[in-house]
Image (tube, rainbow, N blue to C red):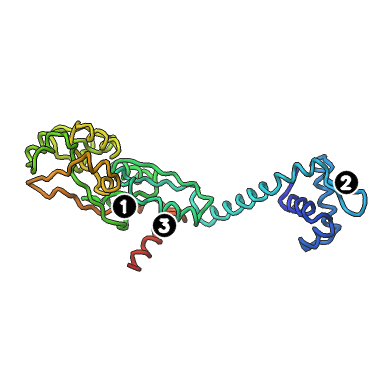
């Protein structure tokens, strides 16, 4: 059986137009070519598709059943061809994007919506990870792009572009011991258990670790849950608290005497200069660069 896209299109058009001659006019072909294509299709399928009694061909019950599936099949074939063409022009087979855990609450989906509108056939995979793990995913090419905080020390292989500013703040449950003070000093912070968002690799020291004792988690949602239960204090995104009125009632922003109790960070889109990027990743990078130029 060797059925091609043109045969399916002719079959669909004959049923919709009601005759070989009408289908021929619609497809800019001669009627004999339409008739021959249908005959060959019937031979390939070993199935009669039209009764040729009278002036116009009458679709058989089998033809009516196949017609219901033909349009979807033609759409899939067109999508397949478009995807193949995009791949030949440099579109990646899939795009893996990792988002640092504390940034999951931000408006990162706008970038995914943009990519989907430009490359609807692209397979996009989204991961979340602590900062250190996200960088490792870039370096080993298990992710091509990352949304992450600015780094104190830049890796020689990384490239980035700034997206926005983000504020992190130290908080504790309103029932936690630290919340009973108007101000807390650094010694109190050090001696109180900290819930810290950190790499799954225990050998990597978390960047915002202040306490001598700490519990680790790999995302800010579980960190927030532990903090709410009074099991420790921690550093959370300010926007996360603004967006959730119940958190405002249950958490207290700690006023630390010895240093400013807010941490201002820039959020970057990061990629590795050592890994070859595909069409979609480059499109997003250039889109963000152009937006910055307009500003």
Circle 3 residue? 284
Q: Which residue lies furthest to the bottom in this view?
A: 294
Question: Relative to residue 143, is residue 50 drawn left or right?
Answer: right
Where residue 81 sits: x, y (%)?
A: 61, 52
- Label 3 sits on a secondary structure element that is helix
Circle 2 residue? 51
Say which label, 1 or 3, has the lower sequence index: 1
Q: In this view, does 63 lie above or below 120?
A: above
Circles 1 and 3, Cβ within 8 Å, touching? The answer is no
Q: Nearer the viewer, mark 2 or mark 1?
A: 2
Circles 2 and 1, Cβ within 8 Å, touching? The answer is no
Give the distance between the C-alpha atoms of the residues marked 2 and 1, in whole angstroms. Answer: 67 Å
Circle 1 residue? 158
Give the distance between the C-alpha atoms of the residues marked 3 and 2, in whole angstroms. Answer: 54 Å
Q: Residue at x 7, y 46 (%)?
A: 257
Q: In this view, does 280 lie above or below 224?
A: below
């Amino acid at each position: 059986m060797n059925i091609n896209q043109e045969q399916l299109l002719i079959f669909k058009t004959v049923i919709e137009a009601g005759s070989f001659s009408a289908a021929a006019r619609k497809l800019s072909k001669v009627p004999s070519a339409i008739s021959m294509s249908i005959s060959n299709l019937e031979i390939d399928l070993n199935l009669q598709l039209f009764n040729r009694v009278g002036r116009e061909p009458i679709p058989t019950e089998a033809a009516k059943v196949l017609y219901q599936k033909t349009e979807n099949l033609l759409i899939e074939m067109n999508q397949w061809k478009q995807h193949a063409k995009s791949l030949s022009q440099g579109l990646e087979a899939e795009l893996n994007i990792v988002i640092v855990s504390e940034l999951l609450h931000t408006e990162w989906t706008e970038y995914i919506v943009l990519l989907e509108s430009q490359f609807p056939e692209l397979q996009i995979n989204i991961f979340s990870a602590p900062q250190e793990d996200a960088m490792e995913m870039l370096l080993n090419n298990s992710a091509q792009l990352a949304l992450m905080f600015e780094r104190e020390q830049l890796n020689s292989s990384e490239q980035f572009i700034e997206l926005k500013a983000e504020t992190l703040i130290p908080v504790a449950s309103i029932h936690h011991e630290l919340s009973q003070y108007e101000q807390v000093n650094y010694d109190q912070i050090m001696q109180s258990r900290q819930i810290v968002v950190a790499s799954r690799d225990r050998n990597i020291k978390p960047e915002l670790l202040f306490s001598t004792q700490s519990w680790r988690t790999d995302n800010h949602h579980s960190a927030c849950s532990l903090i709410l239960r009074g099991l420790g204090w921690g550093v959370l995104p300010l926007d996360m608290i603004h967006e959730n009125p119940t958190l405002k009632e249950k958490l207290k922003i700690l006023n630390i005497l010895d240093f400013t109790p807010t941490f201002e960070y820039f959020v970057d889109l990061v990629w590795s200069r050592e890994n070859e990027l595909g069409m979609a990743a480059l499109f997003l990078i250039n889109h963000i660069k152009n937006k910055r130029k307009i500003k």
